[in-house]
Structure formats: C-alpha cells, structure tokens
Amino acid sequence: MVSEKKKPVEEVSGWLRVFDDGSVDRRWTGPPEVQFMVKPVAAHDEFVDGVSTKDVIADKSSGLRVRIYLPEQKPENNDTKLPIILHFHGGGFCISQADWYMYYHIYTKLSRSTNAIVISVYQRLAPEHRLPAAIEDGYSALLWLRSLARGEQNEPHLSHADYSRVFLIGDSSGGNIVHHVAAQAGTADLSPLKLAGGIPIHPGFVRAERSKSQLEQPQSTFLTLDMVDKFLGLALPVGSTKDHPITCPIGPEAQPLGNLKLPPFLLCVASKDLLIDTEIEYFEAMKKANKDVELLINEGVSHSFYLNKIAVDMDPETAAETERLIAGIKQFIKNH
C-alpha cells in the first residue's frame, strides 16, 4: 500500500512549513539572494578578522550546545579578563540557529568591538519544543557559566572570562529570553557569577490586540504580521494568547515588574519596527517600576535591521545605524 503524501498544515512564507505528521521543513524558500544569510558558518579555531569560534556542549544530559566567539588578544593583554555576552538568537522561537551567517557577521563584530567573549545558545525550536523550552535552554547556559565560575567544570576557551561581568543579549524573540532569564536569575544564587546587564534588541513583546505600530509600520523581510501570528501560534503553550507573560511581560498575566530583581537593562528599539509600541510600553513600565533601564532608538530602520547583511553593505543609513547600535552596546558594557 502506498503511503499518502504528507500535507502542509501551516506555512510561514519563505521560512517554515509544518506538515500533518508533525514534521517541520525549515529550508529557505524565499528570495535566493537572501539565502546566504541563513546558511551555517563552520566554527574555526584560527582567528579570522580577530575572532575565533568554537562549538561546545554546555549540558551533557540535554545535549545543549553553545557557540563561543573569542576575540584575539595582543600578547601584552594576555592577562586581561574579558566580559561575557550570553546571546539568544531570534526567529520567533521557531527558526534560525546560533551558527547562521546573519548572527555570525554581527556577533563577530560585537565581540571584536567590545573585546568581550560572546556565547550564543543553540536553543530548541518550536513547534517541536514549545515555550518555555527556549527560555529553559537560555537559563541552562547561564547555569553552565556559573559552574565554570565555581571551577566545577572547565572550558579552555573561557580561561580569560570575567564571570563577574556577564551580560545577556537577544535579538527579537531572543530579547524576550533576556527578560525571562534575567528574572529567573534574580531568584537564584549565581555567585561568584554576576549578571551585569541585559540587552534586549527589538524584543518580541506583543499583546493579543494589535498595536498602532503593528497596523501602521511597514512590514519587512525579517518581520511581517503573518510571521508574528504564526510563529507565536506555534511557539506559545497550547491554548495561550499573545497576552502570555513570555510575549507580554507587562500584561495582567505576568508577574509585576516591581517584584522582579533585574540587572540594569539597555532596551534597543528601531523607529520603524512593527513592535515599537509595545517595546516602548515595556520601557515605560520598567521606569515606573523603578528599574535601571536605558533606551537606545535607531531612527529610520526596521526590525532586526542590523542582521540584514545586504542592507548593512548596500545602504549607508542601515550601516550607520548598525554602527550606532554597536557603539551604544559597547558603552553600556563599559559602564557596567
């Protein structure tokens, strides 16, 4: 008997197809000129443009992997301790990997610019692993760093790490993970590790009801309303709406911000982002709760603009705003 061909039950244009047998196809089917950005970059021990990369297993029981970006040091700086930037990638909790070129091109640059070790987490993806799986992976990576700080484990690539200055950073949905990992860390004893700051970049904060910016701002390759709705429908716990605390940390279902112990935050937003209204709501709620939060606004650009290597190379405005973003992050890390 010939088995019936599996049928797609959900599709997110270009990015992802889910089939009736539960399988998922994440091969890029959008414009071919964009494909290079979603291709993996192999790890390299040698320094390329001042940065070497290594993939390691952070949790043997779960198989959780991370990618380490190590900036090259001059011989005279060999004793310098380097801050750690723990990175959570975006993709609506459903797509993308820590080794994709779109992250590689910007996080090698950030590692070099800030002279910091970047550690990017290979998060589990929905719908196979619905939330809070990605947040659990982010927190597990932080606990791995704590075990290294305590000398319970050893990772030669991190021999120069300063565990008293660990920053969380995340793009888009990775920005949500920054908030929730920081909140969870506030209830734990991480010593001698210290969480020095959180940097959500264009976090995926939304409400069940559409905001004005979602209705009025232009959609882009990296964010459409279709992507917001479908990715979150596949990622949030079954039966949840976008008012779930993971996507709406300022909503009625979320723990009040005033109850959370959070490190200083640098919230990065883009003026043409579909999600800017809810991001600014979050900023104002953090201020009202007396949290230490700064705001960095990039003008004239849209969601995750700095990850779009084509625009960064071809458009002077995007290039200039990317430099401003990196300079702002560098200053925040220097200050903390």
Image (cartoon, helix red, strand yellow):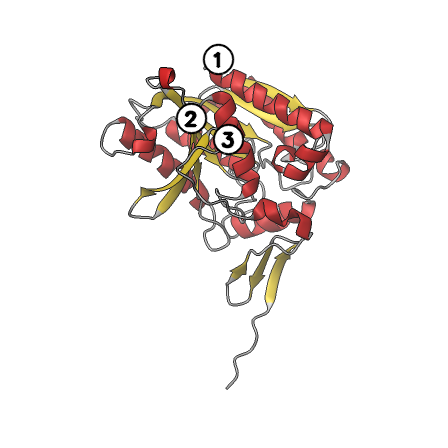
- The location of residue 83, given as percent across then percent down, is 40, 22
> Residue at image x 59%, y 35%?
205
Image quarter hosting the C terminus: top left
Count neighbours of disc 3 (C-alpha within 10 A) and say few if under 14, some if 14 to 19, many if 20 or more: few
Residue identified by numbered label 1:
335
Q: Residues within 10 Å of mark 1 (few under 14, many from 20)?
A: few
Q: Amino acid at mark 2?
A: Glu
Residue position for label 2:
72
Mark 2 burial class by Cα count in 10 Å: few <14, some 14-19, many 20+: many
**Element marked by disc 1:** helix
Residue mark closest to the camera, 2 vs 1: 2
The residue pinned by badge 3 equals 49
Earlier in the chain: of badge 1 and badge 3, it is 3
Earlier sequence position, callout 2 versus callout 1: 2
Give the mark nearest the N terminus, 3 or 2.
3
Residue at 37% x, 15% y is 76
**Label 1 vs label 3: CA separation?**
26 Å
Q: Is residue 233 left or right of residue 223?
A: left
Looking at the rendered image, the disc whose residue lies closer to the viewer, 1 or 3, is 3
CB of mark 1 within 8 Å of CB of mark 3?
Answer: no
Work out whether residue 177 or residue 54 is closer to the camera in this orientation and state it: 54
Query: Which amino acid type is marked by label 1?
Result: Asn
Q: Quadrant of residue 117?
A: top left
Residue 6 is left or right of residue 81, and the answer is right
Amino acid type of the residue tagged 3 in the rendering: Asp
Q: Nearer the viewer, residue 138 or 29?
A: 29
